[in-house]
Image (tube, rainbow, N blue to C red):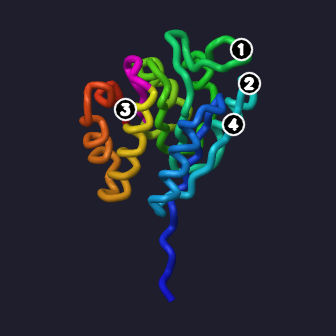
Amino acid sequence: MQKSKKKTVVRIVTTSTASEAGALMAVLRYFDRYQASVILTTNKTKFLKTLSAKADVLVLAVHGVKDGIYLPTTKPLPPKAIAQQRIKAPIVVNLGCSTFSREYAAAFHKAGVKTYIGTDDDPEGDAALLFATNLFYWLKQTKDLQSAYRKASQIDKETKMFKLSS
C-alpha cells in the first residue's frame, strides 16, 4: 500500500461570495497536493479571527483599497490592525489590490508571517486568480516558493504587480 503524501493546508479567506475563492479552491484540490478550504467572513472581528486559522498557506481573496483591506461592513482594515494579530500560517498570499507596501509587509511579518505576497497596484481580478493558480502549480512542481513566485509573477504586466517579502 502506497503512503499518501502530506498535503499542504491552504485556507482561502474571502469577504464576498465572488467566485475567485471558490475557483482557486477547486483548482488547488484538483492539483491533489493541497487541502484547500474557503472561509467567508464579512466583518472585522471574524476576519481578524480567521487570520489565526492553522494553515501552511493563508490566501486572502479580498479587495484592497488605499487605506487597507476592504471589509463590507466597516472601514478598511489598516496594516496596523494586522500587526496586532498572531498569524499561524508562515505564508500569506494577498490577492487584494494595493496590498503590498513596506507597511503591509512589516505588519504581516510582525504578526508572525515568514513570507508575504501582495500587489503594489491594482491588477485585474482575473490576473490575481491567474497568479495564484500559477504560484501553487509551480510550488507543487518545484517545492521552492521563491522559484514558484518568480515564474508566476512573470506571466504579464498584471502578474508583475505581485511582490514578495521574506
Q: Rate crowding at label 3 as few (under 14), some (14 to 19) or many (20 or more) other CA atoms within 10 Å.
A: some
Q: CA distance from mark 4 to mark 1?
A: 16 Å
Q: Rate crowding at label 1 as few (under 14), some (14 to 19) or many (20 or more) other CA atoms within 10 Å.
A: few
Instruction: Please report contact status of discs 2 and 1: CB closer than 8 Å, yes or no.
Output: yes
- Mark 2 = which residue? 43
Q: Position of residue 38 (x, y in %)?
A: 63, 44
User: Which label sits on residue 26?
Assistant: none
Is tag 3's residue or tag 1's residue first in the polypeptide sequence? Answer: 1
Circle 3 SS class: strand
Q: Residue at x 37, y 37 (%)?
A: 131
Q: Position of residue 115 (x, y in %)?
A: 42, 38
Look at discs 4 and 1 and give the one toward the viewer. Answer: 4
Q: Amino acid at mark 1?
A: Thr
Q: CA distance from mark 3 to mark 1?
A: 28 Å
Instruction: Please report contact status of discs 3 and 4: CB closer than 8 Å, yes or no.
Output: no
Q: Position of residue 141 (x, y in %)?
A: 32, 59
- Mark 1 = which residue? 74
